[in-house]
Image (tube, helix red, strand yellow):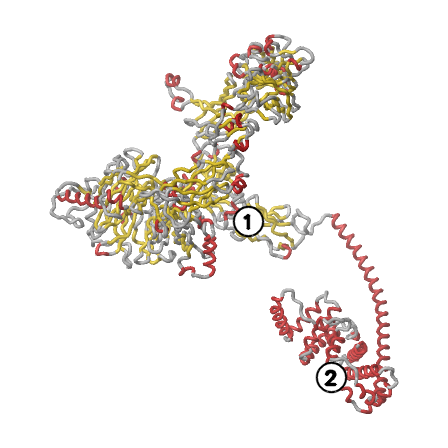
Amino acid sequence: MTIWRAWEESSCWLQTSVLPTTELCTMTHAKKFGFNSLGVACALLLCLFPSCHSDDQIVTEFRDDGAHLFNNIEVNPSNGIVYVGAVNKVYKLNPNLLTWNAVITGPFPDSIKCLQGECKYEKPLTDNFNKILLVDEDRDWLIVCGSIFQGVCEVKDLNNVSRIVRKQDSQFVAASNATASTVGFLSKGPYQQAVLVVGTTVATHVIDGRIDVSQYWGKIPAVSSRTLNDTASIFDFAVKSPPPSDKGTFVHFQRGGTRYELTYPIEYIYGFTDNDFNYLLTIQRQSLEVGTPYISKIVRFCQSDVEFNSFTEMQLNCGDYPLLQAASVGPLGKELAAKYSMSANAKVLLGVFAKSSSSHSGIPVSDAALCIFKIYDIDKTFNQSHQQCNEGYGSSISWISSLNCYKSVSDSLCKPDFAYLNGTVPISSSPTATFTDTFLTAVAVNSIHNDTVVFLGTRNGTIMKLNINSPTSAYVYDEVVVDAGSPVNSDLNFDPEQQHLYVMTEYKLSKLRVQSCYGHVTCSECLGARDAYCGWCFTDNNSRCSMQGECLAGDWVYYRNSYCAAIDRVEPQHLQVTQKKTLKIYVSNLPAVERAFICVFDVGLRHLETVAVKQEGGSVISCSTPDTDRLIATLVPSLEEEFYTTKLAVRVSGNDVDIVSTNFTFFDCSRYRSCYGCMENNFGCTWCTSTGRCTHNPDQYCEDRADNVHSASSVSVGQHRGSLDCPMIIQTSAEILVASGEYLQLLVGVRNLLPALMTSYDCQFNIDGIITETDAYLNESAETISCESALFQYSRKVDIVKAPFAVVWGIKKLPLDDKNPVDVTVYKCSEMAALCGGCLLLDPKYHCGWCDDGTCNTQKQCLSGPWFDSINGTICANPVITNFSPTSSPLEGETVITIEGSNLGISFDDISPYVTVAEQPCNCSAYRDLYVPASRIVCSTSRVRSITSGDIVVLVRGDSRYVATSTEIFSYVDPQLEGIYPTVGPQSGGTKLTIAGQYLDAGSSVKVFIISQPKDTAGSDSRVEKRQATAVEQSCSVVYQNSSHLICLTSEAKGTGSAIVQVKFDKAVKNLLGIPFEYKQDPYINSTASSLENGKGIGGIPSGGLKVYVQGYNLDIILSPKLRVILGNRDYKSDCVCLNSTLMVCDSPQFPAAAAVLGERPQALEYGFIMDNVFSLLNASSQQEALGKFTLYPDPVVHSFSEVGQIKKYKTDYLAISIDNQCEVCNQEDFFKVWIGQEPCNVSSVAATLINCIPPAVQPGRDTKEQYPDVTVVVGGVRKYVIGYLQYDTEDLLLPIWAIILIVTVGVLLILVIIIVVVKYCMNMSESEKEAKTMRQRFDWIEMQVAAECKDAFAELQTDVTFPSEDVSGFGILFHDYKNYALKVLFPNELNYAVLGDIEVEDETRRPVINKALSQFSQLIDNKTFLLLFVRTLESDKYFTMKDRNVFASYLMVALQGNMEYCTDILKTLLADLIEKSMQGNGNPKVLLRRTESVAEKMLPAWFTFLLYPLLKVSPSLSTAQGQSFSIHCSRSVCPFYCNCCYQMFIFAVVCLSAAVFLCVCMYPCCWCFFIFWLTCSHQLFLF
């Protein structure tokens, strides 16, 4: 993943151009991305991204998070596509370094002992180093050669590097290890065929314990020409003679007994083709003899040579720099080419060389040089060598052949009579530039504006830019840090436009601008940089530093032949801020522009512009300063001092770039507060003495002009001039001291006073913020002023307070100047010292002394008792010892004791001979410099004969009245050594050695030594040898000490063997006899594995806890070994345990921060072991490749139980737990621990997706309040997963006696309770049945009564009713229209019918969506299956109330009234379901249709309502007889309206009864329910 991955994922990338201001971001490669709106938006967004406008020369960068080491880079010259060859990977990048394609090229199983196919040897995973990466434009090929499989090559598609076009496994081309060099380039071969020219260093390997080459080395010549014909023989030699001849387009090391391929390495640096020749540059020894110096050589051979007979070597010299590091072929600029007598843009060979570390070494050092070689001179020297060989002078190349030249008449260079010529005349060049302490690794050249620019890469990751003036002169004008600390690869490539340089380091590829124009904002900066690409573009719109091609409408000034405009002077140079004047600016080299000039004053962050006028002659510009109001308003926040320097710039109107600029100062005299400050400037200010003011205009602001003081630069005329004429105070003493609380009369010197003007004086003191003023008097000589006595006092508890002092005069209290301010120092002795000793040691200038009341004060302030100071020699009473250390000494003495206290004398002589320790004298004379008066004494103890103890006593001046005695006892002891642990340690030291004993804290200096006797004299019979042999003493640094233990760290020993532990307590020396310490050979590690059985590589997870088994020898001599793993810049450590001398077990460390950044891919990390000071194991994996890397895997994920409630039933013998385990070494059974409740579940096996464990036989106890024990999986001892609960199917029947009794008792009681409940229930049921039977009988009687009444009413209806035709015909029957009729039946209790209103929608834009949804819902209602399921689902909801059913049924009938046949079908189905449910249930079927509890029951009356409406409308057309009969009854009514209503109700009741009879016949056996239905309908009619 690259740093631009975010942009890559959005399919947006930019090609950044080099326009200076707009930094145009343009979309390219439309074939891949297309010109769609996303691409355009992405382009616009990235143009706003800061990197598009950055002045940084690095345009963009590419990295790979997988940390693949980059080897080679190639740029397609036609489209700028970039290809990168790295270890195990090849990338295809767009010109802005976004990844287009990438392919993995390794690691793969490989062995140097066999080919790519089957192999009887072990084939470990081997990294593939990219050796050759070349773009073949003619065939759209990318040629890739790697180090694995004996160095085979393959051809990839330029457009898709994942696609292999050609591959030849039997042709070995490149070096087969990581370090051996390989150089390849495309050229023409014999018969004009395309070939790959390759130079290959012989790759050596460790084979069977020795350094050797592969058995297939013979197939890889040192130099060869390989065919690129699109055939099966690709990468074979371009020409190869048939057997037995061993000739062709290749060169081998000569055959014979001497293996020159092992003893004569040739390193190939660079290769190129020119005209009809191919060239290779190498580093090799001067001859085959070992020890000869290493030199650089150049090889040439003809492209058409079919047998490489023209193969010739010549020595390449660059002064005293023999080792070529990198080379490049490129053009020279016109000026430099002329100095080489060459045409412009003629190509030359440039090489960077280094000095050798020694005369016989091929190791370069950091001293480098750049040399330039003309191709013409190179060819000329080669031709001369061939001519000399034809004359019989010279010999063949020693590593190919052993022949001498002979005379020949052949003058052919490509078919010479003598083959493999070793040229005798070197090709030499003097260094063009040399560099000290610089290691050059890369070079590239380009010509621009007649200049030659060279780009040099360094080992430190820097690109240096050189401009070459002559063959022996160059200068570095810019340096760019590309990748600090990482060497620049020798491949430096320009983009097709030559505007950018691709720079590759070990792990980063950078796109670098060749110029740095955009970082320069002024002309002087631009031309001063001397960048050959840059010049200053003068335009009316936007003057800037740019390349010439960007300055399309302006004058472009180049640093070689032009100069920038510059301001020579400004008149005036500075100005009072309150004045406005016209400035004259004298400019040289002023450019000619069409627009007007302006002057710009930069004041803070604001730009104040004024109009400028170019005067005649073209070199003077006049402009006024800004308005004073604007200027002062702008300067107020900034003008804290007396002047402000602004930038004055001249610009073209409408242009923000300065043509010229300089500094201009605005000043304000009024801000100077003293005469001295007013005079000490160059602004021409005047000090008005009478007003105490500094001004630029004394005529306006000064009252008495005769007394004014004028500065030296002032134009005003006066008697007083300069700072020396200012009235001022002269301090008469260096320091004025007064104790707080005392009075002081002050006398100060003065000069330049004006008695006529200054008539009165006062002294002012600022004491801790309080101003005190006293009268002052001028003496007769007018040289001093005397201040009356003033009290100096402050209340703060500080030792010293500075009181500023001033002399003021006149009514206005104007201060006299004080060039060196006079301060009065007020002090308190009591705050400066609290004890007598400290008080007497104060500086005598304070006059402090010790008062008898126990305070430090001046003598005036000591009100009671005597007072004394250090001058009279009095001793402070009550000396005290507060502490001392150490508290014990060996009998031999010379322990240095530090005694601290108070009043311990005021000089060293007061205590020197008078200190005793345990009644023994303590020598202080050697420690005079460490004595601190009154508070610290340092002395050394004396030697004693036996153990003793006592006080420390200090007798000040030997006077028994002044004795200080310690409160603790000091002891003389005899330290004893009793044992050590451990008794062995590594030779490198670092062992934490613990010494046990008694009184081990004695003395002031404890040193531990380990003394060993050399082995070579231990067993010698010579007494002289033994006597002369000296013991080897190794120190052991003490890190901890108490009375019973010493801990020290051993140092490195010169050899192994036993040694004596010796401890020195000051002068006492103690040896531990009988228990030696043994130095053993340092531990060594042979192998590491995650398991002793399978021997897999080691690894871990962020949670840690994996076992790492380490095998080696002497492992147990380390007390606390640790495993160390390196991730990023941090070390992660874990403890190890040594099982024996050859086996150690470590836990993998925890990586707290790794889990968030690791992702899903493992990382290979370096690791080592911390084993005391055995630093050879600190980075063991990097020093011993056989140990491999530490692989950090993601944490395994344990999945929770998928059962309901995460409760898993345990049935079988094993418990299976699902995991995601990518860790290949996490198969250790003890790594995963499973707990069921409080007991472990024994892990039996671990796989990538499963953990099997055996639970306890009996369900364990619970850790939580849940019903079942929880299952916890612990990963690595740290990470815990609670994945659910485990339920045992069978419970253990073996219960305690008390549990059985309890269960039986509870069971008996439960049975009794159940019996009582059942009896009570039966009794209640019997009573309920009786009541139900009574209710049924009452219902039956009611039904019989209703039936009889209905029967009578129907008979009466058939005989008596007549149609009231006469009464009705007058005004007709009154009834509602259909809408109101239906609404009153369907919604009887509502006044506002929602069904009639419009749908209220808050957002009108959603109305079409809602209408569409309602239309779709209407279509669903017309689907019978959906509607029936819909109704049944609603009725099954327990929250669907009776009211909801009624409302739903009414709305449903409204929706279905347009299709009554469909409505009848739906109703019939719902009624059938309702009847069937009533018959099957336990309820009484006779209550059906009585309470309208279902949707169908509500729909049925509505259905009749809709069907009966037409009958009501046609009711007036009934028979006349009926009408007459009806009129008899209605004529007696009060209101005809009620007669109509009664008539309608009568007709409706008849129809309902008829329908009930009809349904009763059709739907038997439930006819009685339809009779009830008729009653319900009649009831609804009356409600209507």
Crowd around label 1: few <14 · some 14–19 · many ≥20 (10 Å): some
* Residue 1257 left/right relative to 1496: left
Residue toward you, 643 or 39: 643
Q: Residue furthest right?
A: 1532
- Residue 1370 horizontal/vertical position (percent): 81, 87
Q: Which is more N-terminal, label 2 or label 1? A: 1
Which of the 4 image quadrants contains residue 1486?
bottom right
Q: Are marks 1 and 2 in contact (CB under 8 Å)?
A: no
Crowd around label 2: few <14 · some 14–19 · many ≥20 (10 Å): few
* Residue 1527 left/right relative to 830: right
Of badges 1 and 2, nearer the viewer stands 2
Which of the 4 image quadrants contains residue 733?
top right
Q: Is residue 899 visible?
A: no
- Residue 1530 horizontal/vertical position (percent): 85, 85
Q: Name the residue under label 1.
A: 1244
Quarter occupied by the C terminus: bottom right
Residue toward you, 1120 or 14: 14
1413 vs 819: above or below = below
Callout 2: SS: helix
Question: Given the image, on which type of amino acid does mark 2 rest?
Answer: Pro
Callout 1: SS: strand
- Residue 279 horizontal/vertical position (percent): 25, 47
Q: Mark 2 points at which residue?
A: 1510
* Residue 1458 left/right relative to 994: right
- Residue 856 horizontal/vertical position (percent): 64, 16
Query: Distance of mark 1 from mark 2, alpha carbons?
Result: 86 Å
Question: Given the image, on which type of amino acid does mark 1 rest?
Answer: Ser
Q: Residue furthest top?
A: 959
